[in-house]
Amino acid sequence: MENINTYTISIYTENNIGLLNRISAIFQRRHINIESLNTSISEIEGVSRFTIVVNLEEDRIKKIVGQIEKQVEVIKAYYHTDEETIYQESCMFKLKSDLLFEEREIQNIIKDSNARIVTVNKEFFVLEKSGRRNEIEQLYRDFSAYGIMQFVRSGRIAVTKDEMKISQMLAAFN
Amino acid sequence: MTTETVKATQTATEKTVRISGSEAIIKCMLAEGVEILYGYPGGAIMPVYDELYKYRDQIHHVLTRHEQGAAHAAQGYARISGKVGVAMATSGPGATNLITGIADAQIDSTPLVCITGQVASHLLGSDAFQETDIVGISTPVTKWNVQITKAADIPEVMAKAFYIARSGRPGPVLVDITKDAQFEEFDFKYEKCKSVRSYKSVCKTNPESVKKAADLINSAKKPMIVWGQGIILGKAEAELKAVIEKAGIPSAWTILGASALPTSHPLNIGMVGMHGNYAPNMLTNECDVLIAIGMRFDDRVTGNLATYAKQAKVVHFEIDPAEIDKNVKTDVAVLGDAKASLTALLPLLNETTHTEWHNKFKELYAVEYEKVIKDDLHPTKEGLTMGEVINQINEQSKGDAAIVSDVGQHQMIACRYAKFNKTKSNITSGGLGTMGFALPAAIGAKMAAPDRDVVAIIGDGGYQMNIQELGTIFQQKVPVKIVVLNNEFLGMVRQWQQLFFDKRYASTEMTNPDFVAIAKGYYIDAKRVSKREELADAVAEMMACEGAYFLEVCVEKEDNVFPMIPTGASVSDIRLS
Ligand SMILES: Cc1ncc(C[n+]2csc(CCOP(=O)(O)OP(=O)(O)O)c2C)c(N)n1
């Protein structure tokens, strides 16, 4: 068996209803678990961008990307290793306000982790932290000891170190 | 044309007219050259049917007896004409009944536009009467699909639908239209679609890759071509023939590639795959360069991939980039349209004859003839064989008929033995293996090519999967010839049970009705034969009949189809008995 690696797939698409369904079906059919998925606008007007993280052999990821690109509304799909991208995840913690005022350690964790306070009120406060998965996990472990009221983490978003020539490609389409 | 008339026609097409969404759908079809469509009405598509009534002189709607029949008929139409087939159905059950045909068209790259009615847009998602999420259901089996909720979107979407269905690697497109959009009025103007941003239908053939392919082919001592339906879809039959002849390369075909080169061509070495010919299967594992053209290395063709053509360098001519290296790793991939690629290849090829290598195919053919073909085509034992029926049809049609086959033993026999002089003559369900395909597909084929003899070869099992389409044949007066090879078994499954499941014939025996009486019940001429002496006359009567004709041939109950590559075995482990 080939080595399994983490790959980030970036897909530039038309912004059409139903495309998420088509793309996720490509993974579902092949029993591939999506580690994370994010969709957003991109740098080009009217063009959406999917960022999908999967753990897979390179041979298979190539084929998957081929199948994704085959979809009529997909402009271009790429896959990248972690080394080829700059990537982030984002998360939010909701914690009891007492902790913020009474636990010195909590204040230190916040400072050391560069987490940002989003809001504070009498009952709770909310922290936001963006970074690598391990930083977020570390924070999670640190706060767990004190009790987390709510936690949520986003999918990975990533930009590549190399250029992706989508605009040129779109110009060439017509 | 004078400048004035040019101007006049331009303004005419630019002029908008205020019409309903349903009328727009019909106008779009007319603009796309649709003459026939197959379908079945119902509540959610009634406005379109109402408009069809108005346009009945311009567009012929064929009422099939089941929506699956409509989809398959549209496929048969598309496969023989090379045009887009159109099927229409109502929402809910009508739409879901189309799905098997759509899935079949997807895997066999058949251009279809399917139109389904949908509940009114304010009811979407409310589990309304006859509401199904047909866009969701059809997503994995369509090349593209879309739902329209506003009449104004109809022209652009329909233009896109036809363009996507027929361009590049063709396939089925589903357009779902809510009932309110069918009623809504808007200013109609139609423009054909010439391109879709984000969709690159065909890659331009890269001259460098063609050069590499040519070098490899020129260096080969034992080259072999396997072509598929890409030749037919790409209208590259003449180019294929020129390439084969110039380079003297023995050439085999996949089931969907059948008929692209006449059967009688000296370099045509037969079919590859599970029930293909002995020589091309055996020698796939001996050739030094394997040239795949417009085929996708289906597992029924390759058998065990770990042992498939391992010694050979592989050249793959293909329109769909996702097919490259999907199943078999290539040494040279030539992306692009088959016609363009082969045209570029031809002048670069050396003129050669690989006589000694070609003789190897002939030797193995002789072995197959002795062990299999002779007894199939000229049996000496009492019971009728499927092969001799096909042979009889060959003789009487002189190889000019289009053969539409269903799925099972008879299909393999028909594809193995039918003689084809003309391209687009083999219409069968390849990738999905859909029983029930042939009867409705034959309707579509005959309507698209009324000048051709269309003979459907069907098993007693598959016949009963869409037997209701006899009603369509009768009502529409479609002069198709229907041959049911009755072995009173689901023969192909029985064969597997015999070979791999200890002859435990679980649920494969069929007690059949009086097929002749049924055909006659639909006012179709019919006959049953079970003796060799009766066969030739019966086939002659069938071929001479002006209208539709049903011929039941009672064949040997437990005959098997050989050669055979058992699932998962290597192509060179092909069995002759
Ligand atoms: C819709 C569908 N259901 C089941 C099958 C599985 N299947 C493949 S061949 C076959 C038997 C076909 O029997 P028949 O139509 O009598 O043809 P024969 O093999 O006897 O020529 C079956 C059941 C299929 N291909 N399609």
Image (cartoon, coloured by chain):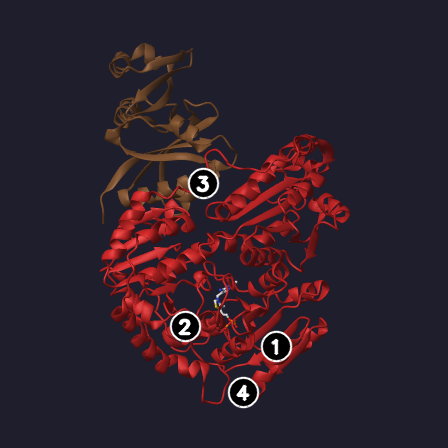
Callout in the foreground (2, 1)? 1
Which label was assigned to residue A71?
3
Q: Mark 2 points at which residue?
A: B496
Residue contact between numbered discs 1 and 3, judged by CB atoms under 8 Å = no
Q: Distance between the residues labelled 2 and 4?
A: 27 Å
Looking at the image, tell me whether mark 2 or mark 1 is earlier in sequence order: 2
- Residue B70 in which image quadrant: bottom right
What percent of the width, then of the height, locates residue A133?
Answer: 28, 27
Marks 2 and 1, how far apart at CA: 27 Å
Q: Nearer the viewer, mark 4 or mark 3?
A: 4
Q: Which chain carries label 1?
A: B
The reply to the same-chain question for discs 3 and 2 is no
Task: Count residues near mark 2 (Cα–Cα under 10 Å), then give few for <14, some for 14-19, many for 20+.
Answer: some
Q: Residue drawn 25% across and 39% down? A: A5
The one nearer the camera, A14 or A152, is A14
Tell me the kind of residue under disc 3. Answer: Gln
Residue B330 appears in the rendering: no
Look at label 4 and name its amino acid.
Arg
